[in-house]
Image: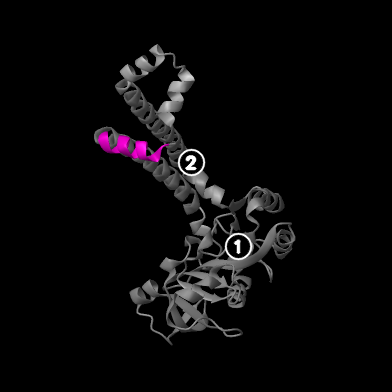
Amino acid sequence: MNLRYMMKELYYQKRRTVTSILGLSIGIALLIILNSLSLAYRQAAHVPLQEIGADITVQRSGDVPQNLAGPVFPCSAVTIRKEEVEKIQRLPGVRGTGTGLLLWVFDPNRAWIVLGIEKENTIGPSLLRASVTEGRFLEDGKPEALVEQAYARQFGIRLNDTISVANEKFPVVGFVDASRAAKIAVANVYLPLKQAENLALSSKGLQSVSPYAPGDVNLLFVKADQEKITGLASEMKGILGSKATVATPDSFLKLLGSLFALSDKFTLAASLIAIIIAVLVAFKTMAGNIAERAREIGVLKAVGWTNRNVVSQLMS
């Protein structure tokens, strides 16, 4: 291709050149932006679980507590047996698990949302270690508590105060900003898992609705191979039964199914339009160039040039 000839054409046909460049640029930019937005929507579905260091969360729904007194399980999170957790841990594709014990505690003068957490596990609510705003995180073997900072501010709870939860005393060793955590890990008070377990074991109201034994939990967080998440979710439901709620990134996509479906259709339609516009602009430019040289092409053909000779001349 003769670059000198091409540069002269671009220079002498400024309007057409600018129009062509702008049309192609807008079409390509639109295509890139829309596809980027579609990808961003799908990546956003992973965020709620990434905040808790997991790929899958598992709960089991149950009966509503009849007597709201002392520690009870929320009806959306009742007992998951230790044996069931162990079966899930052995599933191919499971890379690790974390557990939690969520309680509603109804004391005479105050209601608490209590979450028992594993202090060292990198999967699950122990990631709140990075959200401690004052004081320190929980330590091993100590009956102590973290309090959500907004809740502490509302009820005048100070660092090193002692709070009473279900008649058990816990010194407050730190405040945590739960707004940085996934919603499933939001609570008023965070206790070591063992201390929360003791509260559950001693509650007759809880035991009458959803029997609980040492080692049981009601929240399960699973880290898994990405390509096996969908299959694992089905296997976990098979282990836990029809009342299990297994949340995956696909679950969040389904919650916003109509929005994502509309977004995908719009992206596809707009992408096709952008491609068609770019092609039409290119053809318009080519047609304009050929029309300007109609006389020259006619003369060349009149003296015996073939179509191949003419095309070769234009492209040379």
Per the rendering, the mark at residue 107 is none
Question: Which of the marked residues, 1 or 2, is nearer the chain's N terminus?
Answer: 1
Would you say residue 176 is visible in this rendering? yes
Q: In this rendered view, identify the residue nearer to me: 113 or 201.
A: 113
Q: In this rendered view, identify the residue nearer to me: 95 or 3.
A: 3
Image height of 144 relative to 154, above or below: below
Q: Which residue is drawn at 60% across and 74% down?
A: 118
The quarter of the picture where residue 262 lies is top left
Q: Residue at x 60, y 62 (%)?
A: 221
Principal secondary structure, stretch drawn in magenta: helix
Image height of 295 relative to 111, above or below: above
Where the C terminus falls, by quadrant? top left
Residue type at mark 2: give it.
Gly
Q: Residue 304 appears at what percent x and percent y?
A: 44, 13
Residue 11: in magenta span: yes
Would you say residue 67 is visible in this rendering? no
Q: Name the residue under label 2.
A: 257
* Mark 1 in CB contact with mark 2 (< 8 angstroms): no
Where the N terminus falls, by quadrant? top left
Per the rendering, the mark at residue 221 is 1
Image height of 260 relative to 122, above or below: above
The quarter of the picture where residue 15 lies is top left
Magenta part of the protein: which range?
2-13
Element carrying mark 1:
strand
Residue type at mark 1: give it.
Phe
Q: Residue 295 appears at what percent x and percent y?
A: 31, 17
Q: In the displayed image of the protein, which residue is found farthest to the front?
A: 303
Alpha carbon distance from label 1 to label 2: 24 Å
Element carrying mark 2:
helix
Q: Residue 51 appears at what percent x and percent y?
A: 50, 63
